[in-house]
Amino acid sequence: MSYLRVKVCGITREEDALRAVRYGADALGFLLWQGSPRAVSLERAAAIAMTLPPFVWKVGVFVNASPGEVEHAARVARLDVAQLHGDEDVELYRGLSVRIMKAHAVSGPDDVEEALALPADVMPLMDAADPVLRGGTGRNASWAHAALIARARPAILAGGLNAENVVDAVEAVRPWGVDVSSSLEDEPGVKNAKKLAVFFAAVEPVRSVRRE
């Protein structure tokens, strides 16, 4: 049996961060890319991160930031993970002080091959394709192709997850974790307390599942 991790992304407010943790979030994501409608300043992310319990992972989301910029942000905000959502060469980031996740749009066999070719210490995040927003679109990744990745290595499933479909998604893909954002919001970056509660209640029955 393996425990399903849940990451709540697009955090911009302390109250949303603490509420997500109370409901059971294992990780929180901060959009440190100003092209996102959920963008947060590095200083704000650092302030929120300081309020979190020690075992909650803090994930900085970047789009084509340089390794130096990522390292600086990691130290200021005490990040545990850098999630790369652009066209980065992951080899340039593997020596940083944080773990690396690499987002991959998953819609076909070529995407599966690219995700499986990532170094073993880089975790794939399987998302829907969007060259502009780079995530948070509310659209699903291809679960059938995502399942091929998750069967071969630990991977995170993102893209259009909500309280109504998360159980089906987990059962279809068997991911190491799930990443949820837009379905929990009143507006970009502002989480809804009831939606958070409903999502965590929905996902709870499948948080311990057998992954072949």
Image (tube, rainbow, N blue to C red):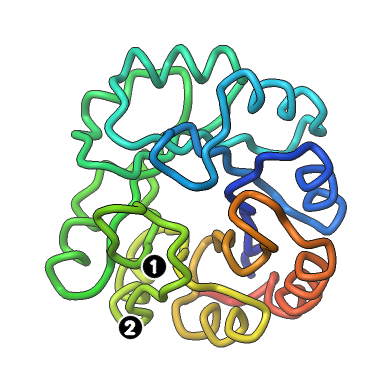
Percent x, y of residue 143: 38, 80
Q: Where does residue 91 sit, x and y in percent of width and height? A: 21, 29
The residue located at (33%, 19%) in the rendering is 95
Could you tell me the amino acid type at mark 2? Ala
Pick the front one: 54 or 106: 106
Residue sitting nearer the eye, 92 or 120: 92
- Up-down relation of residue 49 to residue 137 (above or below): above
Mark 2 vs mark 1: which is more N-terminal?
2
- Residue 201: give its label: none
Residue 49 appears left or right of 59: right
Q: Nearer the viewer, residue 195 or 28?
A: 195
The foreground one among 212 and 105 is 105
Q: Residue at x 63, y 49 (%)?
A: 189
Which mark is nearer the camera, 2 or 1? 2
Q: Residue at x 73, y 53 (%)?
A: 25
Residue 79 pos. (x, y %): 57, 26
Is 190 on the left-hand or right-hand side of 155? Answer: right
Amino acid type assigned to the residue bearing label 1 in the image:
Ala
Q: How many marks?
A: 2
Label 2–label 1 contact, CB within 8 A: no
Q: How far across and how far down the image is residue 159, in percent?
A: 45, 68
Q: What's the mark number on residue 144?
A: 2
Tell me the CA gap for discs 2 and 1: 10 Å
Helix or strand or loop: what does disc 2 sit on?
helix
Q: How many residues crowd mark 2 within 10 Å: few (<14), some (14–19), many (20+)?
A: some
The dot on residue 150 is 1
For the residue carrying disc 1, how many other residues have a C-alpha within 10 Å: few (<14), some (14-19), or many (20+)? many
- SS class of the residue under badge 1? helix
Residue 195 is drawn in which quadrant? bottom right
Q: Residue visible at 16% across and 62% down?
A: 113
Position of the N terminus, as image quadrant, is bottom right
